[in-house]
Image: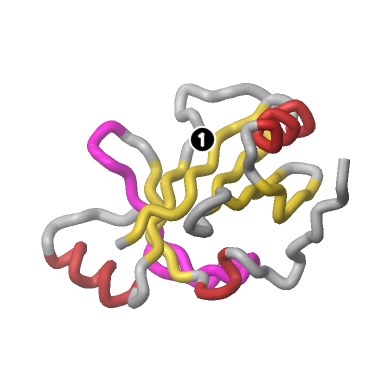
Amino acid sequence: MQLNQVTVPALNLQVSTNFYRALGLRLIVSSPHYARFECPEGGSTFSVHLVADVPSDSGIVVYFECDDLDAKVRHLKSEGFEFSQDPRDERWLWREARLRDPAGNQLCLYWAGENRRFPPWRITEQPS
């Protein structure tokens, strides 16, 4: 597995987008409720999603990309891991399975291939 992306909640998407761009992340996907950034080195991505408030379940999801997601999930299940979502194809062109860690943080094991960094809706950032 390779740690790839962390998604965190945002109360004001524009303020959060400006903050992370100022940190040096490159905006690669933008919608009214979601922004994804590419890290300057290694191609890892980080994203924020709009929420009305930060719930007790913070909304944070940690993503780990797996080359053979279905085999990985089968193996983990055989080791006693419980999944809240078995592998399935999502509308954003990723195949995902979900589970929680012992503290209740949500984990997403997934396979996205080129769609992770180059989805069909990828934007070309405009100079500020």
Q: Residue at x 20, y 64 (%)?
A: 77
Q: Is residue 127 above or below residue 53?
A: below
Q: Residue at x 63, y 22 (%)?
A: 53
Quadrant of res 94: bottom right
Helix, strand or loop under label 1: loop
- Dot 1 amino acid type: Gly
Return the x and y of residue 3 as percentages of the image width and height.
Answer: 37, 53
Q: Residue at x 59, y 32 (%)?
A: 9
Residue 32 in the figure: left or right of residue 116: right
Return the x and y of residue 125 as percentages of the image width and height.
Answer: 81, 53
In the depicted view, which residue is nearer to us: 55 or 94? 94
In the depicted view, which residue is nearer to us: 56 or 127? 127
Residue 54 in the figure: left or right of residue 31: left
| Magenta residue span | 85-103
Q: Is residue 11 above or below residue 116?
A: above
| Crowd rating for badge 1 (residues with CA inside 10 Å; few <14, some 14–19, many 20+) | some
Residue 51 in sight = no
Residue 99 magenta-drawn?
yes
Q: Is residue 4 above or below residue 75?
A: above
- Furthest toward the left, the residue is 79
Q: Is residue 34 above or below residue 84?
A: above
Q: Which residue is mark 1?
A: 59
Return the x and y of residue 90 as percentages of the image width and height.
Answer: 57, 67
